[in-house]
Amino acid sequence: MLARFLLLLALFVVIARTFWRFIDAVVRGASGPAPQGGRRPGPPAAVKMSQCPVCGTYVVPGKAISIVSGGSPIYFDSEKCRAEYQSR
């Protein structure tokens, strides 16, 4: 009786693991091809944020409004902040 139970338990574990690997493969296949090297991309790289000189809000330079002053860019979070900075 105990041997039968252990064999059924082992069979259940094998079937469950096979099923889980199949579902994992389907999900990976549905998410598109893997990039070269076979690894999927991890979290995006960190971006250094800049502080708006008018209100102090931190902005991502690639998405911010900017002007060049003294040879270096200054980033703003809105047109209002840029206009206020320029009127100084």
Image (tube, rainbow, N blue to C red):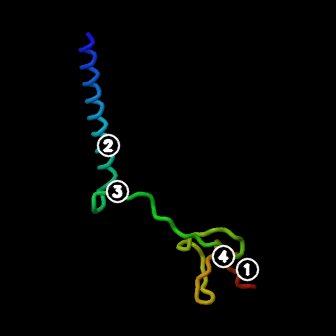
Front-most of residues 1 and 71: 1
Q: Amino acid at mark 3?
A: Arg
Q: Position of residue 74 (x, y in %)?
A: 62, 80
- Point out the residue furthest to the right here: 88
Query: 49 left or right of 22?
Result: right
- Point out the residue furthest to the top here: 1
Q: Position of residue 80 (x, y in %)?
A: 70, 75
- What residue sits 26% from the left and 35% below the top? 18
Q: Residue tagged by mark 2?
A: 24
Which of the numbered marks, if any, corresponds to residue 40?
A: 3
Element type at marker 4?
helix
- Disc 3 versus disc 4: nearer the observer: 3
* Within-10-Å neighbours for mark 1: few <14, some 14–19, many 20+: few
Q: Position of residue 60 (x, y in %)?
A: 56, 70
Q: Residue tagged by mark 4?
A: 79
Task: Please tell me in which quadrant of the rendered image residue 15 appears.
Answer: top left
Q: Earlier in the sequence, mark 3 or mark 2?
A: 2
Q: CA distance from mark 4 to mark 2?
A: 47 Å
Quadrant location of the N terminus in the rendered image: top left
Which of the numbered marks, if any, corresponds to residue 84?
A: 1
Q: CA distance from mark 3 to mark 4?
A: 38 Å
Q: Earlier in the sequence, mark 3 or mark 4?
A: 3
- What residue sits 29% from the left and 49% below the top? 29
Q: Amino acid at mark 4?
A: Glu
- Disc 4 versus disc 2: nearer the observer: 2
Q: CA distance from mark 3 to mark 2?
A: 14 Å
